[in-house]
Amino acid sequence: MNRLNIFGIAVLALSCSGSDAEARSYLESQGISVTELKKDGAAFKYTGKKGDEICSGTVTIKKGLGTSQQSHTNSCVRDTSACKPGAAAACVKLADEFYGREAKVFPKQAAEFYRLACADGDGHACARAGEFEAIGKNWSKVREYSQKACELGNGDACARLGLTELEGLGTDKNPTTALKLMKKACEKASMRGCRNAAGVLLDQEASDPEGAVPFATKACTAKFEDACFVLGLALFRAKKEYSTAFIHLEASCNDEAFKKRGVACNIAGVMAAEGLGMEKDAARGLPLFEKACASDYPDGCSNSGKLYKKGLGVDQDKTKADEFFAKACKLGLNEYCEK
């Protein structure tokens, strides 16, 4: 009988739940500062803070003879209550955190925070709001936010606004205004602005490679995207500092992931074969032309064919020459097509 009673008492003890104070103590040991705690059957429902997060869930405490078992479930989200009108710095801090969580993803919540901070005059926030609108090609909004950010001193926003002027996105094309904005962006330390200013100067109808050089140099020094290729191209077209131009063009040629690899390889090949900034060396130029051809750049194919046909820098090989000429024809150089 005593034995049964003992077991009966044990069963009752194991079925006993903990108190409110014990639930709070346990949650605090898990790093959760409780803001609300309510009894829910044998468990407690709670809300609390853990660092920068707001958490909610259930905690269960079971007590027996000399024993106590605790467990909890929770779901936590970032506390965003600090972001509100008039608190631009807090909004930007939160937005930057959300923005940086995953590469190539711009969270909508980050955009909301940036828009709030932009309304309070934060240039970085306005620039990011414009960046978000560009994803959906909402060009009127891109221009609105970018213009405000540019006026607030954000260089990258000036560059983005310049791009809309250059390509006629949400407005008429205006290369002159585009160039002014890109130069302004570069002055404000935007390497995108420097690179784009150089590109516009090179591509405009009255090409100005010499004028492009200082902008491209600044962006190349910062190792910004393809700025070193642009610098090499500008120097080559300006007919100055050929040796520096070759270094940048050859480096771009050797980058297999570079989209304009064929152009870089072909120009570097021309410089080697014709002795621009170096001793004339057709043998050095040939592999550069072949890389250009392999990248489907037609002039690389025709130049490779010419060297094989004449035996310059390589043994003369008419069959190979004809193969390169045939590819040049296929890529659109009609003068190399068989009659």
Image (cartoon, rainbow, N blue to C red):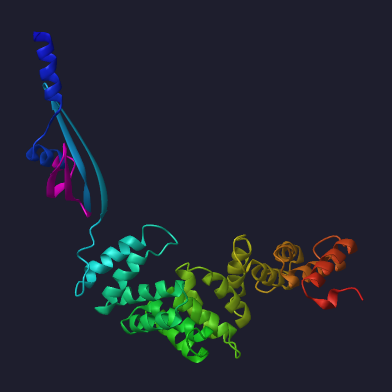
- Residue 10, given in percent of the width and then of the height, sits at 13, 19
Residue at x-position 21% and y-position 49%:
56
Name the image quarter holding residue 92: bottom left
Q: Is residue 51 left or right of residue 277?
A: left
Position above or below: 256 against 190: above
**Residue situated in front as seen by the camera: 36 or 266:** 36
**Residue situated in front as seen by the camera: 41 or 87:** 41
Residue at x-position 33% and y-position 61%:
98
- Residue 99, given in percent of the width and then of the height, sits at 36, 63
Q: Is residue 203 left or right of residue 41?
A: right
Q: Quadrant of the C terminus?
A: bottom right
- Residue 280, given in percent of the width and then of the height, sits at 73, 70
Q: Is residue 30 left or right of residue 265?
A: left
Residue 216 lies within the magenta run: no
As drawn, the residue found furthest toward the right would be 339
Residue at x-position 46% and y-position 71%:
135
**Residue situated in front as seen by the camera: 15 or 289:** 15
Magenta extent: 28-53
- Residue 250, given in percent of the width and then of the height, sits at 62, 65
Q: Main secondary structure of the magenta part?
A: strand
As drawn, the residue found furthest toward the front would be 1
